[in-house]
Image (spheres, coloured by chain):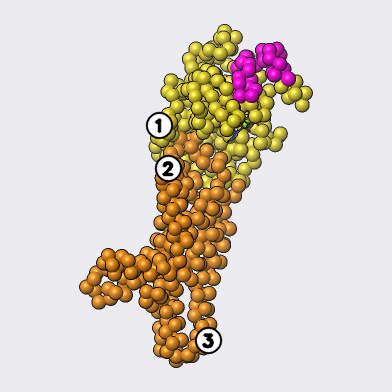
Amino acid sequence: MDDVKPDTAAPSDRTPDTPRDPMVVIDGVNKHFGDLHVLRDINLTVGKGEVVVVLGPSGSGKSTLCRAINRLETIESGTISIDGKALPEEGKPLAQLRADVGMVFQSFNLFAHKTIRDNVTLGPIKVRKKSKADADKQATDLLKRVGVEAQADKYPAQLSGGQQQRVAIARSLAMGPKVMLFDEPTSALDPEMVNEVLDVMVGLAKEGMTMIVVTHEMGFARKAADRVVFMADGQIVEVGTPQEFFTNPKSDRAKDFLGKILTH
Amino acid sequence: MLDIIEKYDILGAFWMTIRLAFFSAIGALVIGTVLAVMRVSPVAILRRLGSFYVNTVRNTPLTLLVFFSIAGPYYILQISLTDVNSPTALVDNGIRWAIVALAVYHAAFVCEALRSGVNTVPLGQAEAARSIGLTFGQSLREVILPQAFRGSIAPLGSVLIALTKNTTVASVIGVAEASLLMSEIIENETASVTVFLVFALGFVVLTLPVGVFFTSLSRRLAVKR
Ligand SMILES: Nc1ncnc2c1ncn2[C@@H]1O[C@H](COP(=O)(O)OP(=O)(O)OP(=O)(O)O)[C@@H](O)[C@H]1O
Ligand SMILES: [Mg+2]
């Protein structure tokens, strides 16, 4: 696994919270929703090629953190930077930065009025200024890779949830992102479709994609994560390798949380 | 009755109604789309301007608007929309100002129809558009508005039907559309129920297909989610 991820140190020879070559740096980030302090002084650095799984009880701020990384949510203090560049405030520079940050949503959010192929080619044509022919060719390759090439001319509503989510991943990949964010990508899926999506994600992780994944799929965390980040009440409570975290959680909150989800 | 039909150009009058409706519908769609974009834009001043327009225009009686369109700009400010020396200048100006007033008025309703369409587009669509790096304008053009238009076809159809019937207001400034001719016939000939029915039927013939067309269009183009 490490030979296809040259940028990443093996999890064992790296201290948990300081990767060598940072891709995403979150520094002292705070955010409130009204009186609710949803992100409390969040510090986290994600290295190039690293896969970080974010875990935590409902309402702990995982989605908010994920969305703050491409500024779908604004923050009140602290900084977030991607590949050395601080997140721009607004406008064109922000749009350009977002093009480098893929995002996969729980509810897929495929463009409902466009075919599967057009969903994948929209960004490359409008943002990356590719020709229609190049974008189509790339879309065909990507749709093949996620196993939905036969559906290219259909509309999102005609696909199963698992297929839609794989298209959403292809749509993000088409932008050639530096990092991909996943916010509970499998929790809206019927159980039999979870694995087809996780398999695509494991493949991406193996190829060296930098990934931040909010998920409760322990199998994925064990198989693909370099580190697990555990959040509770807007704070990062614990960071460790999956092995450390699942077998020997340190905090009571984490023990309590694991006790709940592992007995299910 | 037949002699009335022979004597008066009823078809011509309805043709004027159609022209008024057609051109003011195009104007209303254009202005209404601009207003709708203003009302959903992230710029507060544009949003405020947009809602000011809608609230003002929507609450002004159309008759006043049509009357002032010709009285204000044309008679007082001398803004002519035609070549002043042409023999039909007065008539053409009336028609054109009527179209402007109808377009300006119905733009407010088009805006509201589109905004109700925008509300049918889930927030996730805009977030997905932004997250692949589309700018605000691109997200609107490529993702939000195409879906909003489809979601607002049915209410737009109602606006268009209302507009067609509201063209009758142009008669206050002497535009020779159907309702003006009807008043003329009633004044000069007879106030028979038949005359009234002929004209009412004319409007039904105009608006019914519009309704049927928009209903089927909205079904056909509905965005499946
Ligand atoms: N737009 C919003 N306005 C107000 N409060 C919000 C908003 N979005 C989230 N919250 C609140 O902020 C807290 C954190 O929400 P967030 O969605 O980040 O949690 P989460 O860890 O992703 O939870 P889940 O596992 O349920 O998805 C929650 O209490 C939520 O109710
Ligand atoms: Mg969440």
- Report how far apart the C-alphas of labels 1 and 2 lie in the structure: 18 Å
Please say whether residue A197 is visible from this viewpoint: no
Q: Is residue A247 magenta?
A: yes
Depth check, front residue: A227 or B185:
B185
Identify residue for label 3: B194
**Chain identifier, colour yellow:** A
> Mark 2 falls on what kind of element?
loop
Q: Label 1 sits on what residue type?
A: Pro
From this view, report whether residue A155 is shown above or below residue A8: below
Q: Label 2 sits on what residue type?
A: Val
- Give ligand 1's quarter of the image: top right
- Magenta range: A227-256
Identify residue for label 1: A93
Please say whether residue B188 is visible from this viewpoint: yes
For mark 2, name the chain. Answer: B
Identify residue for label 2: B43
Q: Is residue A81 magenta?
A: no
Q: Label 3 sits on what residue type?
A: Thr
**Chain identifier, colour orange:** B
> Mark 1 falls on what kind of element?
helix
> Mark 3 falls on what kind of element?
helix
For mark 3, name the chain. Answer: B
